[in-house]
Image (cartoon, coloured by chain):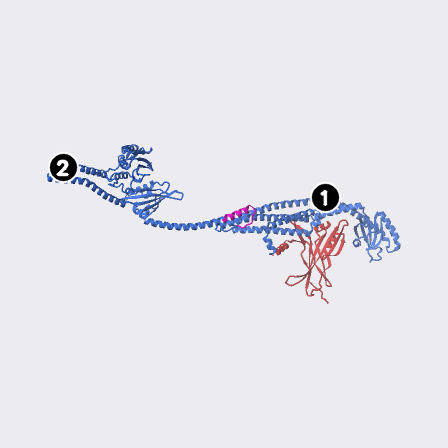
Amino acid sequence: MDLREKILRHRKDHRLIGAGLVALLLLFTALFYLAQRGRDLPAALVTNRVLLFVLWYVNVVLILIVVFVLLRNLFKLLVERRHRVLGSTFKFKLVATYIGLSLIPVLLLFAIATELLQGSIDRWFNTPVAPVLERGNAVAQALYDRIERTNLRDASRVLSEIRGFDLDAPGERPRLTRRMQELLQEMDLDLLAVYEGQEFIHAILNSQSGIPDLPEPDRSFLEQAAREGRSTAVETPAGTNGSLLMAAVSSPPAGGARPARPPVVVVAGSLLDPVLSEQREKLVEDYQAYRQLQVQKDDLRASHLLLFGMVTLLILLASSWTGLYLARRVTVPIQALAEGTRLISGGDLGHRVDVEADDELGVLVDSFNRMTQELESNEKLLEASNRELTTSNQRLGEERALIAAVLENVAAGVVSIDSSGRIFTCNGAALNMLRQREGDVVGRPFEEAWSDVERSRLAAVVKEADLGPGDRRESKEVHLILGGEWKTFEAKVTGLRDSQGQVQGRVLVLEDLTELIKAQQLAAWHEAARRIAHEIKNPLTPIRLSAERLLRKSQQGDPGLGKAIEEGVEIIVREVVTLQGMVDEFSRYARMPRPRPAAVDLPKLVSETVHLYRNLKPGVEVEGEVDAGLSTVKIDGEQVRRALINLLDNAVEATEAPGRVSVAAHAVNGHLEILVADTGRGIPPESKEKLFLPYYSTKGRGTGLGLAIVHRIVTDHQGSIRVEDNAPRGTVFTVELPI
Amino acid sequence: MRAKLALLCFFLLASQARADARISEIKIGLDGDRVLTTFTLRDAFNHRLLERVESGLPTPILYRFELARDRKRWWDEKLKENTLEVVAMYDAVARAYTVHYKLDDKLIESRTVRELKALEEAMTTVENLPVFSLAGLPDDWRLLVKVQAEMGSRTVLSFIPVTINTDWKESSKFHAPKTP
C-alpha cells in the first residue's frame, strides 16, 4: 500500500485531523513570530524582490487551493442536487452556511485590516519628519557646497599663483613650498596639493589640522578634474574622524612648452570638524534611510499585504476545510439515513446504515439500524403468520364447504344470523320449509325477510329468544300457514358466541313437525276411537244384558217380570246417563270457544283456584304465589282458570301425603310464566310425549281430555306448555302466555 | 498532472510589465571567438529609478543576453544565455555613485562616478562587452544576439509584484569566424 492509499484510507481519522490542526496552529505561530521579527528586519530585506514574489506565489497557490476546495465541493453539491440525491438540499444549505459563516467575517476582516494597513503606511510618510529631514539634509549639503565652492576658488587661485613656477625644476621647489605655505595659511586650508595629471608633484598640510599623512585622492577624482577642469570629493583621512572636503581644478601646463604633458591639477582641502562632520553624516544617513523607506513604500505595503493575505487565506482555507468537514460529519449520516429510509420504504429491510458517528447522530444511526432489524424480524414473523393464516383459511374454507354440504343435506333447516340481525346463511332445507328463495333471505335482516303475516311468528321467535349466558338453547313450536297449508315447526334458537362468550349472532334450527303431529294425531284418534268404543261398550253391556233378561223374563212369563223391568230399566237409564255425560264431555271439548282476553286480576284468580284444593286431600299442601309486579294481566280468565283446575286436579290426585302442590306465577321476558309443581309419583318419559293428546290417560279412568283441554287453551292464547320432572320428585308443568 | 497544472498557473501569474525604456541598435564585434556587444539602454533613467538610486538603495539593471541560431521559416534556436547585472549605489556622505558590473554573477568591474550623467552612462551604456564565446560553433550558422533589460519591479494594485522589462532586441545576423 503506497502513501497515497494510506492517506486516503486514514483521511477521516480523527488523529490525522488533529495532527493537521496542530500543524496549522504551529504554522500560524511561526507566521506570527516572523511578523514580530519582521519589525526589526531592515526594510531592504522586507521589500526584497524575491521575497515579494515568493509571497505572491504562495498567495496565488493558496487562492487556487481555496478556490479548488470550494468549487470542488460546490460542484459535487450541485451535481447531487441535480440528481435529486436524498439529503443534498440539506447538505447544500449546511455547507453554504458554514462557508458563509467563515468566508464573510474573514473577508470583512481582511478588507478592514487592509484599509487600516494602507492608511497607516500612508500616514507614516505624511508626518512632519520628512520636511525636517529634507531641510536638515539641505543645510548639510549647503555647508558642503559652500566649502567646496571656497575650496574650488582657492584651488583656482593657487593654480594661477603657481603658473609662474617650473614644476620640473628642482631649484624652484623651495620657493614653491614657501608660496604654497603662505597661500595655505592665507586661505585657511588644511591641504594643498599639486598634481600633473595623476602624478603627484607637491603637497603641504596644515600642521594644525591633525591630518597625520597626506591623503591619496581617488583616481577618478583627479581624472575628472583633468578631464573636466574641476571636481570635488569627500574623504575621511586615516587617523582623523573628520571629513576632508577636496576641490580640484586643472589647467594646461604653463608656457605650452610640452603640449603633450598632462594638465596641472591643484587640490585644495578643508578638514571639517569631527563633531560637525559626524552630525552631518548622521543627518545624511537618516535622510537616506527615510528616502529608502519612501522609495520602498509600495514594496513595503505589498509585502505586508501579501503576508496578511497569506495569513487570511490560510485562515480561510482552515475554516473552509473545517466547515466542510463539520458539514460532512452532519450530512453524511443524515444522507445515509435518508437513503436508508428510501431503501427500507422500497422494501429492502436488510439495509443497514454503515456510517461512523459517535455523537447524537451515532445514537440515531444505531436506533435506525435497530429499528430496521426489528422491522425485518417482524416481517419474517408476519410472513410466517401469513402463511399459517393462509393455510388456516384454506382449512377453514374446506371445513366451511364441508359444513355447507352437510347443512345442505340435513333435513333440518339451519339459518345463521349475524350480530346485526342480517341472515348470513340459509340452507336448502330451511328454504324449502319456509318456501322462500335464497335471494329473498340471505343478506337481509331476518325481520325484513320474514315480515309477512305467515312468517312473522318465526321472526318473533328469533327476536324474543333468550340468549342469556351459557350454552342456552331455546326451543319453541311455531305454527305457520304457508301457501294455505298448516305447518308446525320446532324452532331452536342458539346464540353464536366468540371465545370471550360474547354473542356474535344466532342460529335458527327448524324441524318440520307437521307430519309427525299428523301421525301422532292419527295415533291419538286411533287410541281415542278405541277408548270411546271401550267406554261406550262398557255401558252397552249392562244395557244389552238387562234388555236380554227382560226379554227372557217376558218370554218365560216370569212373575218377577215387573221387578225385573224395574231393575233393568234402572240399569239402562243409569248407563244411558253415563253415555250422555260422556257425549256432553266430548261436546264441550269440541265446542271450546276462542279465548277472549281481558284484564284479569291474576293474584285473585290464582288464590281462588288454589283455595278450591286446599284441605281437599289430607297431608297434601296446596299453595299459590304471584309476583308482586303481576297484578293485572290480559288473558281469558275463565279458560285459564279451567286450565289451572285441570292441572291442580291431576297434581293433587298424583300426590300422596305427605306432599306439596304449588302454583307460582312470574313475569319472564314479557311472558307470563305459571308453574304448577307437585311432589307426586311423576310421569314416565314415554307418557310425556302423549300427555296432551285427547283421550290419553294414565289413570285408567276419566275421559283423558283434561290435559288436552289445557293444551288447547294454552295454544289458543299463543302460548306454550311443557312438562318436566320436579326435583327431587314429582312433576312440573310450565305454562307460558304472552301478556 | 496536478504539478504541471500548478506550474502552468505559476507562469501565467508571473506578471511582467513593459518598460518605456528601449534598447538601441546592438552592434556585434568579434574578437577571436568572443562576441563583443555594444548597445545603449535609452529612456531608462526615469524618475523612479533616480529616486531609488538617490535613496542609497542598491539599484540594479539586469541585462539578459541570448545567443541564438537563426533558422529560416522556423523559430530561432537558443544556443547560450548570459546576464550582466549593473548595480548602482549612492554614498550620500561621500556624494559618489559606485557602479558594480557582474557578468554571469561574477564581478568584473567597479566604477565610481560623481555626476548623474556619468551614472546614467555607466548604467545604460555597454561597450564591447564579451558576452559569449563562439568556440565550437559551426561557422556556417547564422547567429544573432538578443538583449533584454530588466529594471527592477513595481507593484500592481498595491500588492501584485511585476518586473519591468524591455522588449527583446535582436542584433544583426553574423557568422562565427572560420577556424584556420
The residue to which callout 1 is attached is A129
Up-down relation of residue B26 to residue A389 (above or below): below
Amino acid type, callout 2: Ala
Chain at numbered mark 1? A
Query: Which contiguous range is marked in magenta?
Result: A353-373
Up-down relation of residue B55 to residue A716 (above or below): below
Residue A564's label in the rendered image is 2
Q: Which chain is blue?
A: A
In which image quadrant can residue B135 be found?
Answer: bottom right
Q: Which of labels 2 and 1 is toward the front?
A: 2
| Figure colour of chain B | red
Our reading of the magenta stretch's main secondary structure is: helix
Report if residue A367 lies within the magenta region.
Answer: yes
- SS at mark 1 in the image: helix
Q: Position of residue A592 (x, y in %)?
A: 24, 38
| Residue A387 vs residue B26, the one in the foreground | A387
Alpha carbon of mark 2 to alpha carbon of mark 1: how far? 192 Å
Q: Quadrant of the C terminus of chain A?
A: top left
Q: Earlier in the sequence, mark 2 or mark 1?
A: 1
Q: Position of residue B25 (x, y in %)?
A: 70, 58
Report if residue B129 lies within the magenta region.
Answer: no
The reply to whether dot 2 and dot 1 touch (C-beta < 8 Å) is no
Residue B48 visible in this rendered orientation of the protein? yes
